[in-house]
Amino acid sequence: MKNPLVSIIIPNYNYGRYLRECFDSILNQTYTNYEVIFRDNASTDDSFNISMEYYYKFKEKGIFFLLHNNKQNYGSDTNTNLAIGDANGELIYILASDDAIEPTFLEKTVSVLEKNPSVSMVMVNRIEVDENGNRKVTPPFYNKSCIIPGEEQAGVFMMSGIAIPGQRIARTGGMINKIAKFARVHEVAGDWYNNFLYSCCGDVAYIAEDLCRYRVHSGNETHISEDTLLASMEHFCILNSFVTISKGFGMKIPESRFDEAVKKLGSMCLRYAVKMINAQKNSIASRYLKLALVYDENMEGTEEYQLLLNYLKGDKSAIEKFHTFTEQIIERKKSYDPPKGFIEIDSYGNRIH
């Protein structure tokens, strides 16, 4: 696979205010063999006019730009799948229209795939950008760039989704055919589900560099799903799917981590509760505390759980401790060692011996 065509899929709904940054980040790529498939999902803002403006900019650069303007809103997953159906590339990359990428994103990720045929998908680290453009650097998930055996990574995916679509690029063709029969539409966790499927098809590479810019704002679908508790409950259903799917691929590690993964959902509920408290949505926070006990019946005895419970009851000592104590609950502060069997690489996929 030399200089393969990358299909960049950009689904959009009412993110005109971020589109120029997204498109510019693609135009600035050092790797140039790509096409852009943009599908607007019946936006009511200026998204379509902006996409027409960039249609000509991509054309001037010799880049194929396919533009669709849906007459009705089909929903996020369906809109994305329709765009994927128009892709011609050997590699596929889905970029949310409110996100952006660094200039060497394609160059480095494609190089990893070219040099390592066993790899089905490459993930990168991301930084977070708020509505005002302020950046927050997060530590890489793994503490080094590496290639991880598929089954080992599937075991990690039982515990964490790790990457949004903008952090990953994957092979198409035969790889897609292997997982097509497992395709499902999810309200929230479709990214996590697809990451797991790719790990069933081959090894997974990780580049420990900030190559993706993830936009965090109140309009994110993740924020909406957190308010309704949908994300947590869908996660539980997906864990059960992971066990069934992995057995079909002859894997044992995912099932061995199922109980541990369900208990982690209890800890995630505490994080959601903290976010709800910070957003002054105490009634939703209370529901998360109750849901945490469904996933881990021993959670009630933990210091974290009691602190949040007492905070919601108005306990003054808990209120005083809340802001300093809960910082460690919300965000991951460290990077992890890769699982056993990993191979260390540089950011271009060259193996480090």
Image (cartoon, grey):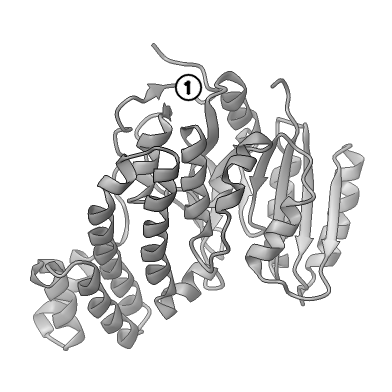
Can you give x and y, in whole percent of width and height, for residue 274 in the image? 29, 72
Which SS class for mark 1? loop
Q: In this view, does 173 lie to the left or right of 259?
A: right
Q: In which quarter of the image is residue 282?
A: bottom left
Pick the front one: 177 or 279: 177
- Near mark 1 (Cα within 10 A), the count class, few <14, some 14-19 or many ≥20, is some
Q: Quarter of the image containing the C terminus?
A: top left
Residue placed at 23% from the left, 80% from the top? Answer: 290
Up-down relation of residue 254 to residue 150 (above or below): below
Up-down relation of residue 102 to residue 319 (above or below): above
Can you give x and y, in whole percent of width and height, for residue 35 in the image? 79, 41
Residue placed at 78% from the left, 46% from the top? Answer: 36
Q: In this figure, which residue is indicated by the disc labeled 1?
A: 346
Can you give x and y, in whole percent of width and height, for residue 49 in the image? 85, 65
Q: Quadrant of residue 295?
A: bottom left
Q: Is residue 11 left or right of residue 199?
A: right
